[in-house]
Amino acid sequence: MGAKYIPEPFRIKMVETIKMLTREERKQKIAEAKYNMFNLRGEDVYIDLLTDSGTNAMSQEQWAGVIRGDEAYAGGSSYFKLVEAAQDIFGYKYIQPVHQGRAAEKVMFGILLGQDKYSISNTHFDTTRAHVEATGARAIDCVVEVAKDPAKRAPFKGNMDVEKLESLIKEYGDNKVGLVVMTITNNSAGGQPVSVQNVRETAAICKNHGIKLCIDAARYAENAYFVKEREEGYSDKSIKEIVKEMFGYADMFTMSAKKDTIVNMGGLIGVKDDEKLFQACKERTILFEGFITYGGLSGRDLESLAIGLYEGLDENYLKYRIGQMKYLASRLDEAGITYQSPVGGHGVFVDAKAMLPQIPFYEFPAQALAIELYIEAGIRSCDIGSYMMGNDPDTGKQIKSEFEFTRLAIPRRVYTQSHFDVMADALISIKERASEIHGYRITWEPAVLRHFQASLEPVEI
Ligand SMILES: *Cc1c(COP(=O)(O)O)cnc(C)c1O
């Protein structure tokens, strides 16, 4: 039995027309884009699943907040509204807005990391890894083994491997590990949740070794919904209670607010109680982002963010949101298409290695599948695999990713059930002709975060 689509807990008040291209036109557009999804124009895409980041539909309350936004340079009311909302939800004393998640990383990591240091995470997201490396430190991933088998179902495949964490800290030495980062949900492992118990255990290890624990908090609400659904002892707790408990174990958080807070731009830093650390954050915020009471954002952004923090916690909304993933996943189950399962919080991560076994990792199977999805149905997705991983900073050699996922990331409150059927139908027809699909090679790449800008071409067969 397939999963039922959970009806939207809202209705549509404003619409945005989307252009429909022919298959031939799409083939031409993707070639012109050098087979890089980021080079496509948004208007040439029918269903845009490149990311769930900043692509969300705001509510009428948030839009009303845009009008109310206080644009004072210092001490605007929207700033105080945001700080109070975040203090209430996360229980942290200090809150700093910044313009997006990587700005929070830049501010925070520069204080705690540097040459010869390590950051250990369940999995560093790509910008997180890049900001760790930009300080001169090394980023080490330490996810549970079960996460590496997409077909194997487990409730918390985003978890930190705590035994391995302990042994890595012993190997590097307490004073060399500048930071432990807990990414919730674990984006690169497929939007997989982390249990409260795992955060508690990780925090205990960090405390023993005097290392700070930072939550990479982009999808705090979706993670809490999974905890409520799956973790023993949490079914009667509210989403807000679960969020507060989880954050209570960590020392600070960096957050891309472009995800679960349902806005188009924004980020946050939270520090539980370390006044000295927060003072350093404020200084670096002024240096990189602007004065502390706006942090690189407009007053209207702060206002809609304050409202979105609460809307993201609404349980009816989260049930519908996670329900969309389950619906698409169940259609893929029926077709025998494998993905990181059970499905995660913000998208479906299709196992391109399983669908295109003829393409080796250095010819980027997940990128090849993303290109086919665009040609097939105008769907823009992206590679979360070897193409995104890039080259080893020490050897310059292509890294072989644990996963070759094509990620269909779902914007919040944007697409309807019929769009989800288009996604499923496209994947099913690609599967039928999978053996004819070839890989790609890079013809040009920049030094860091290459997947955003690189040029590719088809490998001749
Ligand atoms: C999106 C994201 C980031 C980076 O945030 P931006 O707002 O894109 O700069 C960091 N970590 C995780 C887990 C993310 O999903």
Image: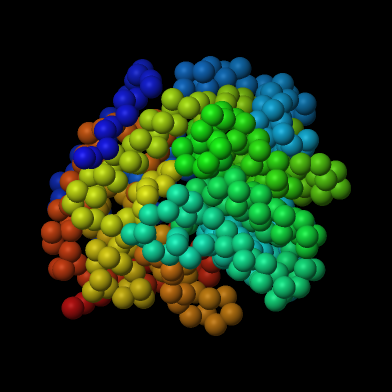
Give the quarter of the image for residue 310: top right
Which residue is located at x 30 percent, y 67 percent?
A: 353
Which residue is located at x 48 percent, y 65 percent?
A: 145
**Looking at the image, is 420 positioned above or below residue 334?**
above
Residue at the bottom extreme?
A: 395
* Residue 36 visible in the snapshot: no
Q: Say left or right for 84 vs 324.
A: right
Give the quarter of the image for residue 290: top right
* Residue 9 visible in the snapshot: yes
Give the camera-side residue of 273 and 96: 273
**Looking at the image, is 114 positioned above or below residue 93?**
below
Give the quarter of the image for residue 38: bottom left
Give the camera-side residue of 81 and 191: 191
Q: Say left or right for 29 vs 346.
A: left
**Looking at the image, is 261 positioned above or below residue 174?**
above
Q: The N terminus lies in which quarter of the figure?
A: top left
Which residue is located at x 33 percent, y 41 percent?
A: 326
User: Looking at the picture, how far across and down is residue 328, in whole percent?
Assistant: 28, 43
Q: The C terminus lies in which quarter of the figure?
A: bottom left
Give the camera-side residue of 43 and 51: 51
Q: Say left or right for 287 vs 412.
A: right
User: Looking at the picture, how far across and down is residue 459, in whole percent?
Assistant: 25, 75
User: Looking at the picture, how far across and down is residue 339, in whole percent?
Assistant: 32, 55
